[in-house]
Image (cartoon, coloured by chain):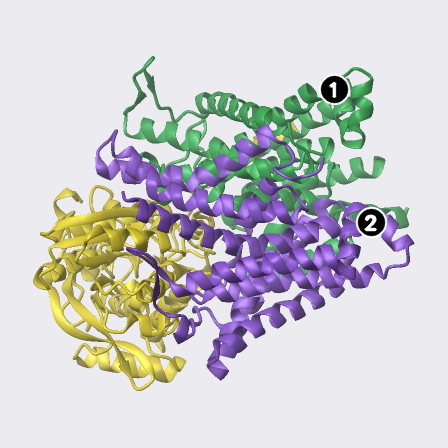
Chain colours: A green, B purple, C yellow
């Protein structure tokens, strides 16, 4: 645990170093790329709460990621065209202010996680994996064939949404906004894990029957974890739309759920910064291998398999072992 | 809409279902016996189709190609089981998901590397080309009838294998209690290799039979993999009977839904938006079906809880 | 920490990206699909483009794989514009990826030359002075198919396409020119490969002809199953399901089918002959429609570079607009919304020795532009 804290400090240090490096080397793309790592890391941190700490293996977190993305895109789209979103039962217009968008994203993601959670948490094991996938697939096919917001073509919003006083199109500014959300997500996760509620949901992962027997309503605990988890991932989706100034159904695809899950497992499940490290590892591999060969997916697959066969509990554990030897 | 047409669409649904069965039978067996979630099952479907296309291209014989699909996928299955999968049985589901997800990347890109980026050619044999009158006013594709027949033959064969043979006894024992059967002195790792290869070859056969009327290309396995998972979850994981009934249910629901929903909606709305909305709901239909079944029966239709 | 924040704030204020001058060298960023299922198209566009610019020392090309994912494509565009400082972007195959990348690119003052996708939004209201389409507007080939259907005397067509925007554009395009009635109209699931149910509907509908737009593996499946079904109706479709890369996989089922295309390997002009010969000797295979589009894109770029320096955006844009190059399609010019005016041919699938290929049988639409010109205000 102490070693992990030590590692986390290093990770933080790197996160602050990168914008400066990007600026000095005149490579703003490194900042953009790290922003992507952070956003996907936040999505993973959301999933990690349910999957890593509570044992709820959701194969449908793309649904929340995509919902957050679409809510952001749609609000901004209506603001751009100065059209009303709807006029019944009350009138609502779009917005391109992040401070307006975020609360709406949080509320809608929480609502969706509540609905999916209530229906899915009746099942366990592989059935839970598949029912969460089913809900995400429903949203995916809906988004593809819903013509108002572009269908499969997706929705372009041209400019990032605005934040008071700063220029969000500037890579470093947007990086800082995402970094803020990352730290908040980590902070919330850490607080939750160490609370008595956190003890309950981590105990459920170990042995749900025993938790039930001490009189805790495990269904409610699991539902709450699932909601928090979905909401954090939804917020990451919102940032992702802003990063790309674009949203399309491809982020609702099952491969997206798979990728978020891969980040979590790669970094090491039930570790605070695990998903971030996993996302960074994955994206750096993708970038470097893609530069060398067209068949980079072959090598990526190979490296992932070797990782899972020989490293076992995630990349972070690798550093831990090394540090132990050095000490 | 005539009743003949409805019946024909029903047959189409059953045919789609029997194909799904070949995929899901292997998947559910592998899960039932070894407790493995195999996302790479769709890759064997692809490998089967590519082996078949290769052999058909060399020899011109569809039947040799089918044989090649079975053996190609089985060989790939054995190799992959021995080199990689074997080490995953004791791991939790998460490691299995990640490793088999990585296998998809590796196998898809590997096949593309060997065969190139363009789809390959695989055709049905000429004596199965064309149609057959099966009722007054109803003619039906010979090849699709052949697929239905093959599907049911294999279902029957699996039934015999599992209930009447020594291997079947071991498989059933493995499904019930994994520790017990190794304690009884059964060579468990050989059994696992056999079951994995059996599942892979069934998927490969499906890939070749379907590849002949669709297309043989990289990435063909993933959409059907997701459907196969839907099937085994609906049927109850580990149950071959559940896989059969789930397959037919999914096949029929998908076919009937996507054809008749737009027709029904045309009663309420103008035709062009009815086709559009109808087909949107049509493509969501099997997922809605699956969610409904799981909400009512959380471990599928024939799953043991 | 406080000091750090102030430093960062200062850094942010200073970070306006400087524009680099390249002299008359042009840096091209090619974002296209090189891995996974649809990579055949991307590889052809890239190879065609590289053939056109081969040996030209003033053009440097950076190629990246978009994995057919729009978000990846946008990020690659950001990288090429921010870090590699490219002047021109090109390469995208799919309409949904183009919708993601093109607005972001042209709004940052870069040129985008589309070698394939031509969604209606980018031709009409969403047109932009820095966006040029060198292939076609998405509706074009379908419109020509509708025109051909009239001349072939079809009265009652059954039409189908996948349920996504390009599919809807396709059916709209066909209906815009087809004068007969519709026996049926079906939107299929995107990625669907089994058409037994749809073919049963076609058989029962009493149609006298079938029009379909099912790109990639979807079309392979449809054609094979349709020919096995024993239905003897004439089929017409855009070239995508009958092009060189895909014909081999469809097989004899495609023989005799009429399809519409702005290019064919037997178009009789010097540029095309040279292209087909060079492509064959360079890559050892017959070129496809996509390869010709990539090639023309490269030639267009070279023609503009000979007239103006890329530094002078307005002059360079004018030079592009003139389209003063020898197109493999023969006559080629841009309409006011920067989409081609060109002939669209009707081709028939034939067998040359053992190889399936296409030959031109007639001209479907002469000097054809697109329906969105009036909506475009540049």
C187 vs A136: above or below: below
In percent of width and height, residue C132 lies at 24, 56
Res. C49 image quadrant: bottom left
* Structural distance between the alpha carbons of marks 2 and 1: 36 Å
Q: Residue at x 40, y 33 (%)?
A: A73
* Residue highlighted by disc 2: B178
Dot label at residue A197 = 1
Q: Secondary structure at mark 2?
A: helix
* Chain hosting mark 1: A
- In this view, the residue farthest toward the bottom is C353
In percent of width and height, residue B9 lies at 37, 49
Is there any visible trace of residue B123 in the rendered image?
A: yes
Is there any visible trace of residue A37 in the rendered image?
A: no
* Chain hosting mark 2: B
In percent of width and height, residue C53 lies at 33, 73
Q: Is residue B294 left or right of residue C370?
A: right
Quadrant of the snapshot with the C terminus of chain B:
top right
Quadrant of the snapshot with the N terminus of chain B:
top left
Dot label at residue A93 = none
In percent of width and height, residue B298 lies at 63, 32
- In this view, the residue farthest toward the top is A90
């Amino acid at each position: 645990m102490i070693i992990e804290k030590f590692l986390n400090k290093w990770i933080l240090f790197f996160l602050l170093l990168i914008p400066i490096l990007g600026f000095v080397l005149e490579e703003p793309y490194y900042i953009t790329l790290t922003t992507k790592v952070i956003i996907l890391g936040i999505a993973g941190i959301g999933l990690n709460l349910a999957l890593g700490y509570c044992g709820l293996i959701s194969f449908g977190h793309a649904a929340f990621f995509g919902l957050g993305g679409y809510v952001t895109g749609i609000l901004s789209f209506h603001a751009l065209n100065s059209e009303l979103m709807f006029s019944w039962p009350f009138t609502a217009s779009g917005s391109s202010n992040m401070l307006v968008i975020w609360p709406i994203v949080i509320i809608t993601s929480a609502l969706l996680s509540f609905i999916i959670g209530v229906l899915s948490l009746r099942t366990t094991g592989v059935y839970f994996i598949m029912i969460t996938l089913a809900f995400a697939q429903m949203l995916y096919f809906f988004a593809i064939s819903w013509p108002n917001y572009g269908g499969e073509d997706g929705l372009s919003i041209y400019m990032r949404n605005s934040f008071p006083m700063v220029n969000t199109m500037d890579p470093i500014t947007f990086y800082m906004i995402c970094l803020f959300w990352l730290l908040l997500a980590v902070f919330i996760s850490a607080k939750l894990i160490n609370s008595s509620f956190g003890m309950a949901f981590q105990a459920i992962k170990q042995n749900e029957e025993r938790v039930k027997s001490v009189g805790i309503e495990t269904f409610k605990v699991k539902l709450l974890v699932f909601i928090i988890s979905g909401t954090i991932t939804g917020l990451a989706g919102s940032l992702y739309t802003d990063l790309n100034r674009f949203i399309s159904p491809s982020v609702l695809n099952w491969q997206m759920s798979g990728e978020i899950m891969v980040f979590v497992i790669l970094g090491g499940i039930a570790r605070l910064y695990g998903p971030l490290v996993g996302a960074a590892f994955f994206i750096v591999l993708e970038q470097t291998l893609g530069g060398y060969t067209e068949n980079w997916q072959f090598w990526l697959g190979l490296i992932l398999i070797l990782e899972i066969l020989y490293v076992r509990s995630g990349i972070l554990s690798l550093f831990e072992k090394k540090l132990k030897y050095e000490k | 809409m005539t009743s003949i047409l409805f019946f024909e669409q029903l047959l189409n649904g059953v045919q789609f279902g029997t194909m799904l069965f070949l995929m899901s039978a292997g998947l559910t067996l592998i899960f039932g016996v070894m407790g493995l979630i195999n996302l790479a099952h769709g890759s064997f479907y692809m490998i089967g189709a590519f082996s078949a296309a290769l052999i058909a291209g060399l020899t011109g014989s569809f039947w040799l190609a089918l044989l090649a699909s079975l053996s190609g996928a089985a060989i790939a299955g054995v190799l992959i089981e021995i080199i990689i999968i074997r080490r995953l049985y004791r791991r939790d589901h998460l490691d299995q998901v990640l490793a088999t997800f990585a296998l998809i990347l590796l196998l898809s890109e590997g096949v593309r590397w060997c065969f190139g980026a363009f789809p390959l050619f695989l055709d049905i044999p000429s004596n199965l080309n064309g149609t057959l009158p099966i009722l007054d006013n109803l003619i039906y594709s010979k090849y699709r009838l052949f697929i239905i027949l093959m599907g049911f033959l294999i279902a029957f064969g699996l039934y015999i294998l599992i209930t009447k043979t020594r291997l079947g006894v071991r498989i059933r024992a493995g499904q019930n209690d994994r520790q017990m059967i190794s304690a009884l002195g059964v060579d468990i790792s050989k059994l696992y290799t056999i079951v994995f290869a059996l599942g892979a070859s069934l998927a490969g056969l499906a890939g070749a039979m379907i590849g002949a009327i669709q297309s043989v290309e990289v990435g063909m396995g993933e959409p059907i993999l997701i459907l196969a998972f839907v099937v085994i979850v609906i049927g109850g994981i580990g149950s071959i009977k559940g896989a059969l009934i789930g397959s037919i249910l999914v096949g029929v629901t998908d076919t009937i839904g996507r054809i008749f929903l737009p027709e029904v909606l045309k009663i309420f709305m103008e035709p062009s938006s009815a086709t559009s909305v109808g087909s949107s709901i049509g493509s969501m239909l099997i997922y809605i079906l699956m969610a409904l079944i799981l909400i009512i029966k959380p471990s599928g239709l024939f799953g043991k809880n | 920490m406080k000091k750090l924040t102030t430093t960062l704030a200062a850094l942010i204020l200073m970070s306006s990206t400087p524009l680099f001058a390249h002299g008359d060298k042009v840096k091209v960023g090619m974002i296209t699909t090189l891995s996974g299922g649809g990579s055949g198209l991307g590889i052809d566009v890239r190879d065609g483009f590289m053939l056109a610019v081969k040996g030209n020392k003033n053009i440097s090309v950076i190629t990246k794989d978009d994995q057919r994912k729009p978000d990846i494509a946008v990020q690659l565009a950001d990288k090429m514009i921010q870090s590699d400082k490219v002047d021109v972007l090109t390469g995208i195959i799919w309409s949904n990826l183009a919708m993601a990348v093109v607005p972001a690119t042209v709004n940052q003052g870069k040129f985008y030359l589309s070698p394939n996708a031509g969604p209606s939004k980018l031709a009409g209201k969403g047109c932009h002075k820095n966006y040029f389409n060198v292939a076609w507007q998405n509706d074009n080939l379908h419109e020509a198919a509708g025109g051909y259907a009239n001349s072939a005397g079809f009265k009652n067509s059954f039409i189908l396409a996948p349920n996504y925007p390009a599919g809807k554009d396709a059916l709209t395009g066909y209906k815009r020119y087809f004068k007969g009635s519709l026996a049926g109209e079906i939107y299929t699931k995107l990625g669907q490969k089994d058409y037994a149910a749809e073919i049963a509907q076609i058989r029962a509908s009493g149609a006298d002809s079938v029009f379909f737009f099912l790109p990639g593996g979807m079309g392979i499946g449809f054609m094979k199953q349709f020919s096995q079904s024993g239905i003897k109706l004439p089929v017409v479709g855009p070239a995508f399901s009958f092009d060189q890369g895909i014909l081999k996989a469809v097989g004899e089922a495609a023989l005799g089918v009429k399809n519409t295309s702005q290019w064919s390997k037997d178009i009789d002009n010097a540029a095309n002959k040279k292209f087909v010969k060079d492509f064959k000797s360079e890559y050892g295979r017959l070129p496809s429609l996509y390869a010709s589009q990539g090639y023309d894109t490269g030639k267009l770029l070279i023609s503009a570079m000979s007239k103006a320096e890329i530094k002078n955006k307005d002059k360079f844009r004018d030079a592009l607009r003139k389209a003063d190059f020898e197109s493999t399609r023969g006559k080629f010019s841009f309409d006011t919304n920067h989409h081609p005016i060109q002939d669209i041919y009707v081709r028939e699938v034939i067998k040359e020795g053992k190889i399936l290929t296409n030959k031109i049988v007639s001209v479907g639409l002469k000097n054809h532009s697109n329906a969105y010109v009036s909506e475009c205000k540049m």
